[in-house]
Image: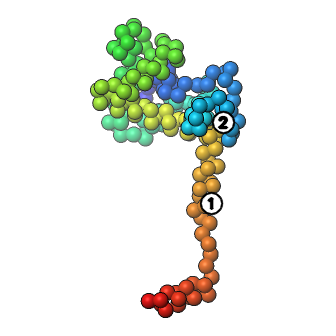
Amino acid sequence: MLLAFERRQAAAILEAYAPPRAESDGDVPAGKYDDDAKSSGERKVRLLVPRPGEVDYVGTVLKMMAASTAQARLGIHLGLAIATFAPLWLCGRFRTMAGLPMEERTPIISRLLKHKNFLVRELMLLLKIGVSLGLIGTPSVRARTQFAAARETREKKLRSLPVVSSAEASSSSATAQEVA
């Protein structure tokens, strides 16, 4: 579905949405937050920061394309093409996204997400959905965020309804009838 050139560009583009943690930053154990984060929201977001090579963004987008309509596949191709050549038409640099270092790719993606043209913004959001699915679809990222544990806790709370015996139920209905 993607040519080799498109795959290389897609990897560079999609990785720029959620740049990997630098090796020197260390790991954040599951359930622990970075102490140097300025807010609790920032600490939670840092748990989603992938390690280098941890998330298969291209594989996720390929799965997305396989499950999509022809129109959505065209949108993904068009979004990748727009982002691939954004350094040229947005910044005036004669490079593709894969030819830029991560520090330069991420601000370009940010500019595309805020672009004045609605179509450009929406196609970049479509790619961002693929990145989000890739992040949360990676077991190690999910484990760090404790996403599954929080979900299981919520499900247990939803399922733990009190059991009412038939005697209690009949006395409650009798009391309700007396009040009426």
Q: CA distance from mark 2 to mark 1?
A: 25 Å
Q: Which amino acid is tagged 1?
A: Lys
Q: Which amino acid is tagged 2?
A: Tyr
Q: Tag on residue 71?
A: none
Residue 3 visible: no
Q: Pointers 2 and 1 in contact (CB under 8 A)?
A: no
Considering only vertical position in the picture, is 122 above or below 84?
A: below
Q: Between residue 142 and residue 36, name the one nearer to us.
A: 36
- Residue under the image location 40 percent in, 34 percent down: 126
Q: Nearer the observer, disc 2 or disc 1?
A: 2
Which SS class for mark 1? helix
Viewport quadrant of the N terminus: top left
Quarter of the view holding residue 144: top right
Viewport quadrant of the C terminus: bottom left
Quarter of the view holding residue 89: top left
Q: Position of residue 153 (x, y in %)?
A: 63, 55
- Residue under the image location 64 percent in, 44 percent down: 146
The earlier-in-sequence mark between 2 and 1 is 2
Q: Position of residue 13 (x, y in %)?
A: 47, 23
Classed neighbour count for the residue bearing mark 2: other residues with Cα under 10 Å, few (<14), some (14–19), many (≥20): some
Which SS class for mark 2? loop
Considering only vertical position in the picture, is 154 above or below 169?
A: above
